[in-house]
Amino acid sequence: MSQYLLSVHMVEGEARGPATPEEMQGFMERVVALEDEMEATGTFVFSGRLTAPDAATVVRAGDGDMIMTDGPFAESKEHIGGFYIIDADDDEAALAWARKVVAAIGAPIEVRPFQATGRVRA
């Protein structure tokens, strides 16, 4: 079993009007059902939603000191809005879960396997 990052990509300024209460309820029902299925199958490790890129701080090494700047590392209209970390048997299984995430939330998903580090999690 390997771990995969399913990153949810958002596009800044993308035309998304405010959701009605019914649309938001449907969205949440789809997400809860997806996460329940992930947990029931032993796939779910954890997930998170990120704040907007302008809330980021970038830390860099420079001339023997650390330099901190406000804002995202890269200026881009696209950014990661959230993610799932999952356990999957192989790439195909991870891609199958990514298709389910896209169906539930309607945003593009990037699938990337974690590289083995030799460290074992407790």
Image (spheres, helix red, strand yellow):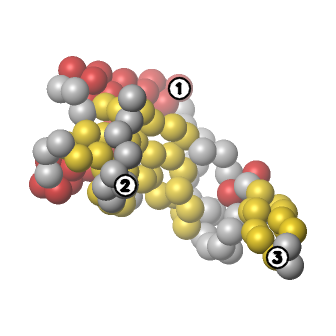
Give the residue type that dot 1 points to: Pro
Q: What whole-number distance in Å separates the C-alpha atoms at marks 2 and 3? A: 27 Å
Q: What whole-number distance in Å separates the C-alpha atoms at marks 1 and 2? A: 44 Å
Tell me where residue 90 appears, x and y as whole percent.
Answer: 14, 51
Q: Foreground: 57 or 13?
A: 57
Q: Mark 2 near mark 3, Cβ–Cβ under 8 Å?
A: no
On the image, numbered disc 3 is attached to which residue?
Answer: 62
Lateral position of residue 100 relative to residue 83, left or right: left
Tell me where residue 108 appears, x and y as whole percent.
Answer: 38, 58
Lateral position of residue 101 relative to residue 71, left or right: left
Q: Foreground: 31 or 84?
A: 84
Lateral position of residue 50 relative to residue 112, left or right: right
As helix, strand or loop, the secondary structure at mark 1 comes to: helix
Residue located at (29% from left, 46% from top): 3
Q: Is residue 40 above or below residue 20?
A: above
Residue located at (38% from left, 46% from top): 119
Q: Which mark is residue 21?
A: 1
Q: How many residues crowd around disc 2 within 10 Å: few (fewer than 14), some, or many (20 or more)?
A: few
As helix, strand or loop, the secondary structure at mark 3 comes to: strand
Depth-wise, is mark 1 or mark 3 nearer the camera? Answer: 3
On the image, numbered disc 2 is attached to which residue?
Answer: 117
Q: What whole-number distance in Å separates the C-alpha atoms at marks 1 and 3? A: 48 Å
Res. 65 image quadrant: bottom right
Name the image quarter holding the N terminus: top left
Marked residue nearer the N-terminal end (2 or 3): 3
Q: Is residue 91 above or below residue 65?
A: above
Q: Is residue 43 above or below residue 17?
A: above
Q: Is residue 121 above or below residue 66?
A: above
Q: Foreground: 25 or 88?
A: 88
Lateral position of residue 37 relative to residue 19, left or right: left
As helix, strand or loop, the secondary structure at mark 2 comes to: loop
